[in-house]
Amino acid sequence: FRPRAELRPYICTSLSRVHVGPLYWDDNTLLARAGGSWDSELVGRTEATRRHALKMYNRIIPALQAAAPHLFHESVHSFPAWLWAWQHVRSRNWHLNKTRP
């Protein structure tokens, strides 16, 4: 794959592996990295991020699969694939949380 010159820096810094970071760690690894405490900030933030990503996946992907099953097949558009793509986008841009009055 040879991206166009203007896209090369972005493409070349892409996440190269699917399972990178605490979002993919099993409970034992997460607990060990958190110093053995389920009450650590690492565990809290990781679990909150996982729940948020799953909520978004469950809201968006089933609707896309129902509307265009030939484009959004479950074997390709799985939660791990969604999590990788979502993590990839979030790692390369910033966002603001919308607050309600």
Image (cartoon, rainbow, N blue to C red):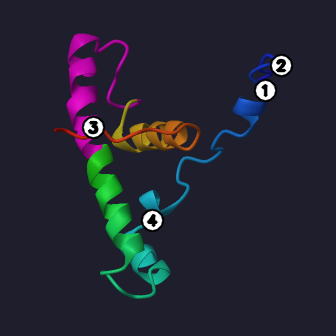
Screen quadrant of the C terminus: top left
Q: Main secondary structure of the magenta part?
A: helix
Q: Is 34 in the magenta?
A: no
- Looking at the image, residue 76 sits to the left or right of residue 54; the answer is right
Query: Of all residues shown, which one is farthest toward the left?
Result: 101
Alpha-carbon span between mark 2 and mark 3? 33 Å
Instruction: Give, as a three-letter code, the residue at label 2.
Output: Ala
> Residue 91 occupies which quadrant of the picture?
top right
Q: Between disc 4 and disc 3, whose residue precedes?
A: 4
Q: Position of residue 79 (x, y in %)?
A: 35, 41
Instruction: Give, as a three-letter code, the residue at label 4.
Output: Trp
Q: Between disc 4 and disc 2, whose residue precedes?
A: 2
Residue marked by disc 3 = 56
Alpha-carbon span between mark 1 and mark 2? 5 Å
Nearest to the observer: residue 46 or residue 2: 46
Q: Position of residue 30 (x, y in %)?
A: 42, 74
Neighbor class of circle 1 (other Cα within 10 Å; few <14, some 14-19, many 20+) is: few
Nearest to the observer: residue 44 or residue 100: 100
Q: Position of residue 72 (x, y in %)?
A: 35, 20
Q: For residue 8, which numbered disc appears in the image?
A: 1
Residue marked by disc 4 = 25
Q: Between disc 2 and disc 3, whose residue precedes?
A: 2
Is residue 17 placed above or below 3 in the rendered structure? below
Screen quadrant of the N terminus: top right
Alpha-carbon span between mark 4 and mark 3? 20 Å
Q: Between disc 1 and disc 3, whose residue precedes?
A: 1
Which label sits in the foreground, 4 or 3? 3
Label 1–label 2 contact, CB within 8 A: yes
Nearest to the observer: residue 45 or residue 61: 45
Q: Is 60 in the magenta?
A: yes
Q: What segment is highlighted magenta in the picture?
A: 54-76
